[in-house]
Amino acid sequence: MDSPPNVFSPAKLGPVTLRNRIIKAATFEAATPEALVTDDLITYHRLPAAGGLGMTTVAYLAVSPGGRTQGKQIWMRPEAVEGLCRLTEAIHAEGAAISAQIAHAGPVADAKSNGAEALAPMTHKLFRAATADDIAEIVAGHATAARFAIDSGFDAVEVHLGHNYFCSAFLSPLLNRRDDEFGGSLENRAKVARRVVEAVRRVVDEHGGGRIAVTAKLNMADGVDGGITVEESLQTAKWLQDDGCLDAIELTAGSSLVNPMYMFRGGAPGKDVPAMAKIMREYPFYDAYLLDDARLFRAELTMPLILLGGITNRETMDLAMAEGFEFVAMGRALLAEPDLLNRIKADGDAHTVQSVCTHTNDCMMTIYSHTHCVLTGAPDKLAAADLGG
């Protein structure tokens, strides 16, 4: 039996060669006040790239103005390309690759700040049911967003199929009780996600020059009664694999709409605020906390998988490699210490370097102001840090 790969060894993600197997997961940056790239956003991604990442993921590049979770987020349009080019060039200069996460927020969209209706499988006081024409427009919007990502120099496009955003909401039996071709059976509920991924792949194949990877972020479970279950998600993943449109799946969990802490684990900030208490449930943090569910996907799928959740040290990275995952994804630990990976790599087999992240999740309370670690400070305060080689 072959020994597992070194997490710091190069790896192929579709047509893209990453210098190592560590990806920065998409995390809201709150660095685009005009819905366009800023120097602040570039710094946010440049620091962990200089700190040793294989690839960073730019969070939430919406496929339409109404698809944003908040009206200051970037939506993919011609005016955004110049700034996105500056961003990708800065990351490439640090030796890392860069992925564009494209998405429509669906029921999680902020209609007020977006100045547009929020769309979902079913009508509610906060959103209305998407028509067949709306669905077709959103599918086409993902394709257009992918084309802008290609034009902007990205190495990969990540399609967001998780967290009860538009595609994920259609997958959810709790949120999707339609009686048309997009509701009822899992096969029907999965049509939106599969059509979106197929549309993105078509654009990448036609315009990507054979150099762009396509990945998806998929919920294994919503952590909500009546929501997406591991069993249904695994079937969806098998269909996505059979469709042949993805180079990897990043496995996630939780519902931004109903139960966000199922994704994060650790402290539940805001749980003492009455308006937030219902959804801010607390779950214990432990290393590789999504691994048990992810193992089921690894056992049934042959395609590359990205393990997310509680990846903070070399021991856990090595465990992921031993379990057969091709990549790991990190979020909060790199927000706290952009240079963490260089230090872990330099530490070798000593395993003495540990993340300073305490998993209180107080950083979550900064995601619509200026995302930063409350322990180590905002990214602009770290810009002059010595990140090593």
Image (cartoon, grey):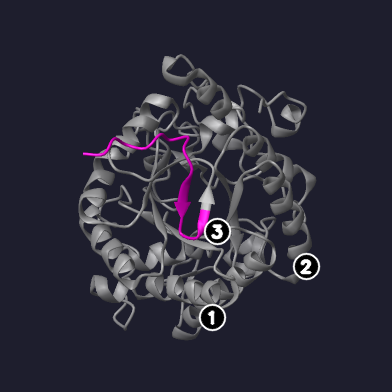
Q: Which mark is residue 137?
A: 1
Residue count near mark 1 (Cα–Cα under 10 Å), binned few <14, some 14–19, many ≥20: some
Question: Residue at horizontal 60%, vertical 22%?
Answer: 375
Q: Secondary structure at mark 1?
A: helix
| Labels 3, 2: front one | 3
Q: Which residues are magenta?
A: 1-16
**Do the residues under discs 3 and 2 have CB atoms within 8 angstroms?**
no
Residue at the spot of label 2: 79
In front here: 126 or 151?
151
Identity, as a three-letter code, of the amino acid under mark 2:
Glu
Q: Position of residue 211 (x, y in %)?
A: 56, 64
Q: Position of residue 25 (x, y in %)?
A: 51, 45
Identity, as a three-letter code, of the amino acid under mark 1:
Glu
* Vertical placement of residue 180 versus 171, above or below: below
**Residue furthest to the bottom:** 133
Q: For residue 366, what is the image quadrant?
A: top right
| Residue 285 can be seen, yes or no | no
Q: Secondary structure at mark 2?
A: helix
Q: Position of residue 310 (x, y in %)?
A: 40, 33
**Do the residues under discs 3 and 1 have CB atoms within 8 angstroms?**
no
Q: CA distance from mark 3 to mark 2?
A: 20 Å
Q: CA distance from mark 1 to mark 2?
A: 20 Å
| Labels 3, 1: front one | 3
In magenta stretch: residue 5: yes
* Vertical placement of residue 345 versus 252, above or below: above
| Labels 1, 2: front one | 2
* Vertical placement of residue 124 versus 203, above or below: above
Question: Residue at horizontal 29%, vertical 70%?
Answer: 242
Q: Position of residue 241 (x, y in %)?
A: 31, 65
